[in-house]
Every structure is written in structure tokens, then in C-alpha cells.
Amino acid sequence: MSSPSMEKATVEQVSPPPPVREPAATDVEYNWHGNNRVQLLENGEAYFPRVFDVLRQAQSEILLETFILFEDKVGNELQQILIEAAQRGVRITVSLDGFGCGELSTAFLVALSNAGVRLQIFDPAPRHLGIRTNWFRRLHRKIVVVDGAIAFLGGINFSADHLADFGPEAKQDYSVEVQGPAVADIHHFALLQGGRPARAKYWWQRRRQRHAELAVDDHDGQVRLVYRDNAEHPKDIEEVYLQVLRSARRRVVIANAYFFPGYRLLHEIRNAARRGVEVRLILQGQPDLRVARLAARMTYDYLLRAGVLIYEYCDRPLHGKVALVDEDWSTVGSSNLDPLSLSLNLEANVLIRDRAFNRDLFERLDELSSNHCKVMSTDTAPRGRIWHMTIGFLVFHFLRHFPAWAGWLPAHKPRLKPFIHPTGSAKA
């Protein structure tokens, strides 16, 4: 990794600073759109060539958000593509998370900025005693929109550890390419400006809206953007999972890297299995963070005894955040099912009603669980479950109900800031 870190280049804003909105359209609620084409992209081998090819063909605009961008072969190729696009007149805005991209060098960022790329850093923070303290409330989304016509959204960052040749630590992950009317919503969301669709004022109106969304037209190619922020949409992604779990009739498959949901989600997963739905969870068996597996295993006994099938993927770290219900509903996105994603981070998923996409995702997850996973049973679930569930309850609800405490006190409201040159001038 490079020498001077990004924080040194983002110490202060320009004077006077231009108004920069927080990276979420906090009063927007997006609807279902039909007649979209959706394509599942598995791992960096499928994702990077396709995204890079579309970026090279960009004519007018590129919007890119990512949690992680590394200065490796993937990040360097992305940098070069963006520089070339900017030089031919494409308007480019790149939003980077201040923690996930905190090791980027000033030289890397300046090269982009000098080419005309507009860089925005979400919640940069200086190190204290050599340690980064901005751990929580991250911009965790991974979104690319090109020319307002093609969008990519999922869990894959711009880093070489999403490629198999990275070695045993290479991540297993998914993204989706969307073309069609739904791209307008993803574009609007990433652009952070434009009209604001009306949002129901009262909770009972919003509840009617949500139930109506479960009964969308029975046609393939339906796509809807759903996101969580720390303002008016703090539970939207969780609510979607609760709705589809309650409506599931035949099968549920959830592949999620960091699984430690709240009790409402655990309750609905258990209830679906109890009423005869085949419920499969594909979770980390070779985690990149050991605590992730320990947290997930606190839930095993509770779920296994209800008939939930739990598989641990052991070939390499699982990083996916995908799910499907029955034969037509699927979701792909950035949101894990843990307190950070469900209560703190800025996340975005797409919901998809498309039988061919659902079938493709099911076949890939079925192959994964059948041939590359270890099946868990009540014999392998950790003992002392009352103690584990008690600790889990306390940890989860501490993070969930007191998110201000999860950042280093005193609590702050994260902001999206323009990249500042070392000379003190900003690149618009």
C-alpha cells in the first residue's frame, strides 16, 4: 500500500465549502419498475471485465460509489479507465468511504482529480495514535451507473481479493447488472439530486404501501431499489426481508457473509421453516473475520431446531449478500444481516421479480451449498445456547438502539466531503 494516506489530503474543506449533501436521498422511496433486463455477475471474474468494458464505452457520465478501493491490479486498472474517460469529456463522480478507502495514497487520488474526476470522501477521519477511529456508520454501498442507462449494484468492491487468483482469501461474492426503467431510480439515488417522490407521512399509510408492493404485476423484469440510511429509511431493508419471509410458500435461500440479525428476522426465518418452507442459510465457514462466525453460530441452535438448513461455505471467505424466495423474488446488494448493516451503515439492495434470474441464482447457490459447504446440525451447534443468546441479545440491541454510541464519543453526523488537494484547493 502507498505512503501518505487519504486523510492527509482531506483535512479540511474548501473555504467557502460548497454544499454537499449526505449520501442518501433521505425522503425518497422508490417503486417497482417493469421491463428491465437483469444479469447476475458472480465474483470478480464476471464483474470486473463487464464493468470495465461498460466504463470504457461511457459517453457522458459515470457515477461510482464503493466501500473499498485498493491500489492493486484492479484499483489501478479502474483508475486508468476513469482518467481516460474524464480526458474524453465524461463527467465522473466517485464517492469513496473514508474508512474502507483510508489507505489510498494522495498520489492515487490526485491523479484522478487532476484528470477531472470529482472525488467525494465519506466521513474521512485522522488517525489517533496510528489507529483509525471511524469504524462505524460507513458508506457500505457498491454502485456504478453509466450514462444513466446501465447500473451495477451488489457486494463486490474494487479490489483484487475478489479474484480467485488472490488465493485462499479470495472472496465469494455477487453483483447484478440492470438495464431498463429501474436504472433511472438507481441513477437518481447515486446522483443525490433531482425530484423527490412523495413519501407517505403516517406509518399506516407506509404499511399499506409495503403490502401493495408484495402484489406487483406478475411479470418478469420487475426491479425496485431499496436502501437504508440513518434518517427516514433506517429499517427499509430489514422490513423487506420480514415481508418476503412471511409470504414465502416453498423455499427461501439466504447467502449472507455476516449473519447476526435481530430477533424479528430470526423469528420469521424460524416461522417460515416451521410452516413447511424449505429454508437454507449459506453462511461463512472460513470467515475473513473470526467474530463473524462466532456471532452467527450463536443463532444456530435456535434455527436448526425449527428445521432451518444451515450450510457453512468453507472454500474461501463468503462475502455475498443475496437471497431468493420461492420462484420469482430475489435480492442482491451490499447489506449484510448484522447490526452494522441493519442499523448503522448506508446500504443499497435491488429487489428483483424475475423467474429466470431467480432460477439462475438458485442454481448457483444450490451448487454452492451441495458441493462446497459443510452441513450444520444440532450436534455441531454450540452448546450453552441460553448464555450465547443472552450475550447476542445484549450486543445486538446495544448497537441497534444506541448507534450514536457505536462511533467514538462524542457522536458525530458523518458527512460527504470533496477531495482536497494537498495545496488546499478542491477539484469540482
Image: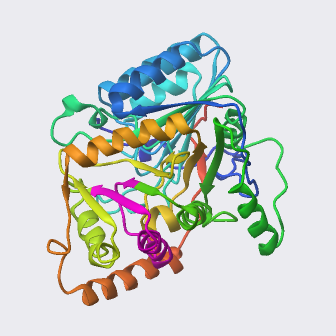
Is the residue 184 above or below the residue 240 in the image? above
Task: Identify which residue is drawn at 35% across, 62% down.
Answer: 128
On screen, residue 359 versus residue 30, left or right, reads left
Q: Is residue 81 magenta?
A: no
On screen, residue 374 versus residue 253, left or right, reads left
Frontmost residue, 242 versus 177: 242
Could one spot residue 156 in this view of the protein? Answer: no
Task: Identify which residue is drawn at 34% across, 44% down.
Answer: 365
Query: Residue 168 in the image: x percent, y percent?
Result: 15, 40
How many tags in the picture? 0
Please report the bounds of the magenta region as a residue range: 254-283
Query: Residue 89 in the image: x percent, y percent?
Result: 65, 13
Query: Residue 146 in the image: x percent, y percent?
Result: 61, 25
Quarter of the image containing the C terminus?
Answer: top right
Is the residue 109 above or below the residue 287 in the image? above
Could one spot residue 267 in this view of the protein? Answer: yes
Query: Residue 281 in the image: x percent, y percent?
Result: 34, 59
On screen, residue 81 versus residue 118, left or right, reads left
Task: Identify which residue is drawn at 41% across, 69% down.
Answer: 273
Frontmost residue, 354 versus 156: 354
**Outermost residue toward the top?**
88
Quarter of the image containing the N terminus?
Answer: top left
Q: Quarter of the image holding residue 285?
A: bottom left
Q: Is residue 267 magenta?
A: yes
